[in-house]
Image: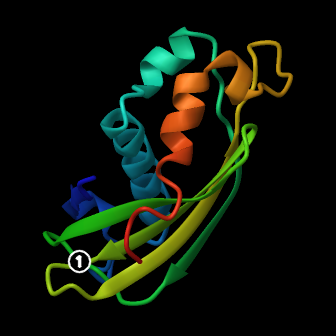
Amino acid sequence: MREYKHKIQYYETDKMGITHHSNYIRWMEEARLDFLSQIGWDFAEMEAGGVLSPVVSVECRYKKPTTYPETIQILVMVEEFKGVKLKLAYEMKNAKGETVCEGKSEHCFLNPDGRPMRMDRKFPELFEALNNQIRKQPR
């Protein structure tokens, strides 16, 4: 599994030239969608197939500032998955290999009517693909 790379854009920085804190959450979302594609589950196709996956919670711990035009590498790890809720962890590193941010997000899977979806029953292949990723990636 390859890490997601994001090149910081000038518009993502604040008046001090430092990346605005809100962008890290957006990068986590970019990395999550890339991660799903890498395991064979394109998010747009999932939505077209009737899978909704809203964010339940999100957390960020900022370790070091980043600036334009750095490239940040984001590792996505499945912390927990039991079929309805998916917990992901993110580790963001700069080119020197220093951790600049650590994050977590929690998502659930819903049917189009808003009721919880049991992935093991509705999409067993996705259920298996996510379970195969639990703790497989280094921290």
Name the colouring of the figure: rainbow
User: How many numbered marks does the figure carry?
Assistant: 1
Q: Identify which residue is drawn at 56% across, 46% down.
A: 131
Q: Is residue 19 visible?
A: no
Under circle 1, the secondary element is loop
Could you say which is closer to the camera, residue 26 or residue 111? 111
Amino acid type at circle 1 is: Thr
Could you say which is closer to the camera, residue 119 or residue 56? 119
Q: Identify which residue is drawn at 46% across, 27% down.
A: 43
Could you say which is closer to the camera, residue 96 or residue 128? 128
Could you say which is closer to the camera, residue 126 or residue 106? 126
Q: Is residue 51 visible?
A: yes
Q: Is residue 30 left or right of residue 59?
A: left
The 10 Å Cα crowd at callout 1, few under 14, some 14 to 19, many 20 or more, is some
Residue 28, picture quadrant? bottom left
Coordinates of residue 88 in the picture (x, y in percent): 56, 58
Q: Identify which residue is drawn at 75% across, 38% down.
A: 84
Single out the residue that lies furthest toward the top: 49
* Quadrant assignment for the C terminus: bottom left
Q: Is residue 101 left or right of residue 86?
A: left
Question: Which residue is disc 1 drawn over?
Answer: 67
Coordinates of residue 138 in the picture (x, y in percent): 37, 73
Coordinates of residue 87 in the picture (x, y in percent): 64, 56
Residue 8, picture quadrant? bottom left
Single out the residue that lies furthest toward the right: 115
Q: Identify which residue is drawn at 21% across, 85% down.
A: 97
Q: Is residue 80 above or below residue 55?
A: below
